Amino acid sequence: MATRKPAQKGARAGTAPRLRALETAKEESDAVGRARVLVVDDDERNLLAIRTVVEEVADVVVASSGEEALRHLLKGEFAVILLDVFMPGMDGYETAQIIRSREQTKSIPIVFLSAVNKEDQHLMRGYSMGAVDYVFKPVEPVVLRSKVAVFVDLFDKTREIRRKAAQEQALLDENLRANAERLRIEKELRRAQQRQAAIIESLPIVLYLEPLDAHPRLPVFVGGNFEGITGYRYEQVKDHPSLWEERLHEEDRERVLAALAQRRHTGTFSVEYRWCCAGGEYKHFLDQAVLLRDAAGKSVEFAGTLLDVTDRKLLENQLIHSQKMDAIGKLTGGIAHDFNNLLAAILGGLGLIEKRVPLEDEHKKLLTMTKHAAQQGSELVTRLLAFARKQQLEPAPIKISHLSVAVSELMAHTLGGLVKLEWAPNKNLWTAFADEAQLELALMNLIINARDAMPDGGTIRVSGENGELRPGNKLGLEPGDYVVLTVADEGDGIPAEILEQVMEPFFTTKEIGKGTGLGLSMVYGFAQQSGGAVQIESEVGKGTKVEIWLPRAPLAPEPRRDSAREDQPHHAGKLRILLVDDHLGVRATTAGMLADMGHQVTEANDGHELLALLAKQPDAYDLVISDYAMPLVSGAEVIRQARELRPGLPGIIITGYADVHSIARRPDDVVVLTKPFTPDQLARAIGSIGIGVAPAPAPAQAEPSR
Ligand SMILES: Nc1ncnc2c1ncn2[C@@H]1O[C@H](COP(=O)(O)OP(=O)(O)OP(=O)(O)O)[C@@H](O)[C@H]1O
Ligand SMILES: [Mg+2]
């Protein structure tokens, strides 16, 4: 066995068979030594004599019997066998017969050696046994050598032909294998290229190569989904080289061209811009390129990518918009809270003047006008609070079919003859969960907007669909079931550039005095506060569609407030009331209203003072009325602590700035009254508590109403 050279150990798996085939061919050629001749004779002298003669032309292997000859034949090849005919044991004929019968040895020429039997029949027997020649003893050296030389020559030539054939076969095999390997690699390469192309095609990206100083800018190579992203074929761009520059957004052009001019110096380029695609829509592209240099460091060209970042940009804009709305909401909420307190004081004060001071008709008129203005201010503040998501909501299950009747009736006079209102809620529409009065108001705002957008008339369609949202939805809502109410019109539409602003408070395109710009703000704030959202789609000249998404009502109906209690008489007697409000004006007017009703009022500046009063005489009071938002202790907390001093003490929270969630955590039997309120509303709130005690008459702090 030939041993491998160490260097071949590291050969790759694929190359190993190839090397082996070549090695085999080489081993065979290395094995070509002198031909061997097998001489078989039982007579030692004959063997010696023949060896001497034959050794000149071949190596000689001797055997003194047929059996020994057969053993030698098992071990290797021979050019010719010189076989004595007469031997003890197995004679030459028998030996020849066996040699001929074996596959391995059947074609080795046999020359019989015979001292006797020159008769024809013996010769014929020898030939029939497979002899190719006869040599008679004593052998003539020259004759024997030349005969043997002929067979040796024949053997050598045969061996040479076989060796060459083996080498050729090995080369052929190697060639075939190399071809197959090449085809396999080519196939793999093609598949890898196809995969790469498929990946790049499916990404929102274009790869390009661009000459250093092309004016106008024109790539020499473009890869990726160019047509899918831009809507143009590359050939179209080549035929119209100024296309890229022409379709840049007007507001971005200067900045982009300046960055482009700089890239030769900086070697890089990265700029975002809007570009008008073949379909006429603008996409946001992130265009980035780097300078490629050759081996000598010379600048060659720019290699770059054009990435469609429209979706990301949209999300960014949405985020910025919602942050802006949030900030405006906080600001508005704060201002509305302060205004609410002022209006509460003004309205309360006006109410007291009206009751306590005898006025002449002219002054009464003035007072009524002032009250009316203050009430309008109060409505405005309510809408602001709605936008700021600070209004007090009473969410409950709402059947939209019931709502449609109520809203249609309310809108009947407002719409005028030219505008038709159609309701088309889905028959199996789920029940929504929201504040019904506020939803009515929101729908009315949307319907009035739709009417205003159709001065020449048209149809307003209000529809309702069930909507399911998955996690990560674009509305940013919790996943789950929603009821989607849509108000669609065929009006003027909203231009894209103001679409983002329409929900901001005070944004209006209507004439002064016609719109306050608070309608959509209210809808927005209401939907958000209800755990839903608003979506607007609009196309100029075609119309507008506003969707309100509201959560679906839980399947078990929410317990509603005990209506029996609301029907109770307004108040059950004269009460001893502890009142706290940190706003002096509101507190004074509220105290005035209570006194006018005949109640005995004790005022406190803040929660601590109220609790201290109660601690001194826990049984001296029948009711606590507390403002909600106070600096030290909230209204809900005041009532909770008051009840530790006097279990079951009835309470009313008055609020202008109701964080509905905190208020929602109030004990069930605490009534919430929204500022500003009239004396009547205050009396009703006290009545709804249903306090049955009739306290001992106490001196009123103020004059009873006249
Ligand atoms: N359906 C609509 N079609 C066209 N434009 C609309 C539509 N709805 C709202 N808008 C635009 O949005 C602006 C803001 O609407 P919003 O309802 O908030 O205020 P407003 O209607 O102007 O005033 P307000 O509702 O307070 O009386 C409108 O002035 C109008 O330009
Ligand atoms: Mg409006």
Image: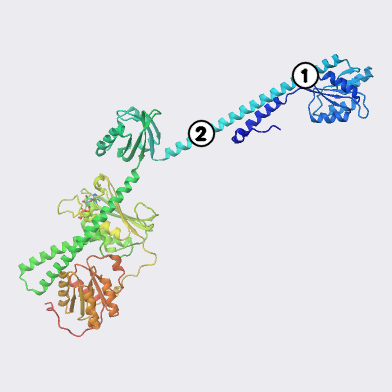
Q: Which mark is residue 189?
A: 2
Any mark on residue 506, and which? none
Residue 67 horizontal side relative to residue 203, left or right: right
Question: From where the camera sits, is residue 496 visible?
Answer: yes
Secondary element at tag 2:
helix
- N-terminal of the pair, mark 2 or mark 1, is 1
Q: Is residue 120 left or right of residue 608?
A: right
**619 relative to 130, above or below:** below
Q: Position of residue 625 (x, y in %)?
A: 22, 74
Closer to the camera in the image, 49 or 570: 49
Q: Amino acid at mark 1?
A: Leu
Picture quarter containing residue 644? bottom left
Does 419 appear above or below 266?
below
Residue 584, how many percent across, how many down? 16, 70
Looking at the image, the residue that sits furthest to the top is 142
Q: Using the image, determine if residue 444 lies above or below residue 148.
A: below
Q: Which residue is identified by label 1?
A: 154
Q: Mark 2–mark 1 contact, CB under 8 Å?
A: no
Nearest-to-viewer mark from 2 and 1: 1
Res 277 visible: no
- Residue farthest along the bottom direction in this orientation: 696
Q: Residue at x 22, y 49 (%)?
A: 454
Q: Residues within 10 Å of mark 2 (few under 14, many from 20)?
A: few
Question: x, y percentage for residue 311?
Answer: 35, 45
Q: Is residue 616 left or right of residue 356?
A: right
Residue 59 appears in which quarter of the rendering?
Answer: top right
Which residue is depicted at the point 79% across and 21% down? Answer: 58
Query: Which of 703/325 is in front?
Result: 325
- Ligand 2's image quarter is bottom left
What is the three-letter code of the residue carrying label 2? Leu
Is the residue at mark 1 in contact range of ligand 1, meaning its CB lies under 8 Å from it?
no
In the image, taking residue 21 as reference, residue 654 lies left or right, namely: left
